[in-house]
Amino acid sequence: PVSSILPKGAVEIDYEDIPPGTITFTVMARADGFSGELIGAGIGIAKGDDYGLIAEAFGNKSDVELKEELKRKLEEMASARGMGNKGG
């Protein structure tokens, strides 16, 4: 399992060649739909001084709706942990 906490110093990498069957940890946002249906998925990250936060959103939503949901989720998570507003 993975948590919504990003360790201090965590970095995003573009691509890494790994052997088949390698166990990896990932955060994924996925939305399924039908032809012509509006679907979207996204991941948001907020960085703090000691650690970061990560959240996902998905569904029959526009990019604007997804961004608003991610911003709200990250703000709520940061507030619950006493973090300042450092959304990224």
Image (cartoon, rainbow, N blue to C red):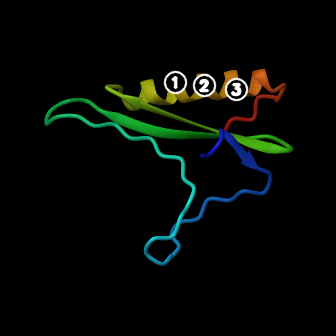
* Mark toward the viewer: 3 or 1: 3
Q: Earlier in the sequence, mark 3 or mark 1?
A: 1
Write down the quadrant of residue 34 in the picture: top left
The residue depicted at 65 percent of the width and 38 percent of the height is: 4
Residue 37 image position (x, y, % from top left):
19, 30
The residue depicted at 43 percent of the width and 75 percent of the height is: 20
Label 3, label 1: how many angstroms apart (C-alpha)?
A: 12 Å
Left or right: where does residue 36 sit relative to residue 60? left
Query: What is the three-letter code of the residue carrying label 1?
Result: Glu
Query: What is the three-letter code of the residue carrying label 3?
Result: Met
User: Dot 2 surroundings within 10 Å: few (below 14), some, or many (20 or more)?
Assistant: some
Label 2, label 3: how many angstroms apart (C-alpha)?
A: 6 Å
The residue depicted at 40 percent of the width and 37 percent of the height is: 41
- Circles 2, 3 touching at the beta carbon (< 8 Å): yes
Residue 58 image position (x, y, % from top left):
41, 32
* Residue behind mark 3: 77
Could you say which is closer to the camera, residue 19 or residue 49? 19
- Circles 2, 1 touching at the beta carbon (< 8 Å): yes
* Residue behind mark 2: 73
* Residue behind mark 1: 69
Query: What is the three-letter code of the residue carrying label 2?
Result: Lys
Label 2: which secondary element:
helix
Label 2, label 1: how many angstroms apart (C-alpha)?
A: 6 Å
Label 3: which secondary element:
helix
- Circles 3, 1 touching at the beta carbon (< 8 Å): no
In the figure, 51 relative to 78: above or below? below
In the figure, 88 relative to 26: above or below? above
User: Dot 1 surroundings within 10 Å: few (below 14), some, or many (20 or more)?
Assistant: some
Write down the quadrant of residue 33 in the picture: top left
